[in-house]
Amino acid sequence: MYSEEDIRRLAWQSRRGMLELDVLFVPFVKEAFRDLASDDQDRFVKLLECEDQDLFLWLMEREVPADPDIQRIVRIILDRVQPH
């Protein structure tokens, strides 16, 4: 369970300095993170540890992450902004 302090910290960490990532991550933390299952919350925290170049490729759907946990959270983020 993530506290409000944890979520504020994650919102800060979500500001990557790359517009394409910021417009996905910051609203996601503020609007969707609390509603995720705890495993998916952990996956998001793990995602934030990745390199920006990788994040960009994954979130622009130019590459697929090798790690299935990262694949899952990337898909959750993309589905939120690009509903099928």
Image (cartoon, grey):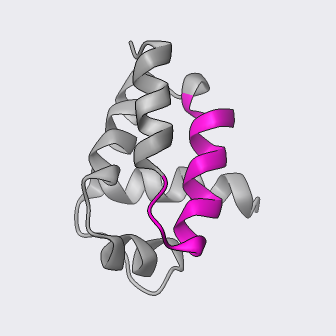
Magenta span: 15-33
- The residue at 44%/17% (across/down) is 5
Compared with residue 1, is residue 10 higher up or lower down, i.e. above or below?
A: below
Q: How many marks?
A: 0
Q: Main secondary structure of the magenta part?
A: helix
- The residue at 33%/79% (across/down) is 53
Image quadrant in which the C terminus is located: bottom right
Residue 51 left/right relative to 16:
left
Residue 78 left/right relative to 9:
right
Q: Within the image, what quadrant is residue 39 found in?
A: top left
Residue 39 left/right relative to 73:
left
Residue 48: x and y in percent read 34, 51
Residue 62: x and y in percent read 46, 87
Image quadrant in which the N terminus is located: top left
Residue 11: x and y in percent read 50, 39
- The residue at 49%/28% (across/down) is 8
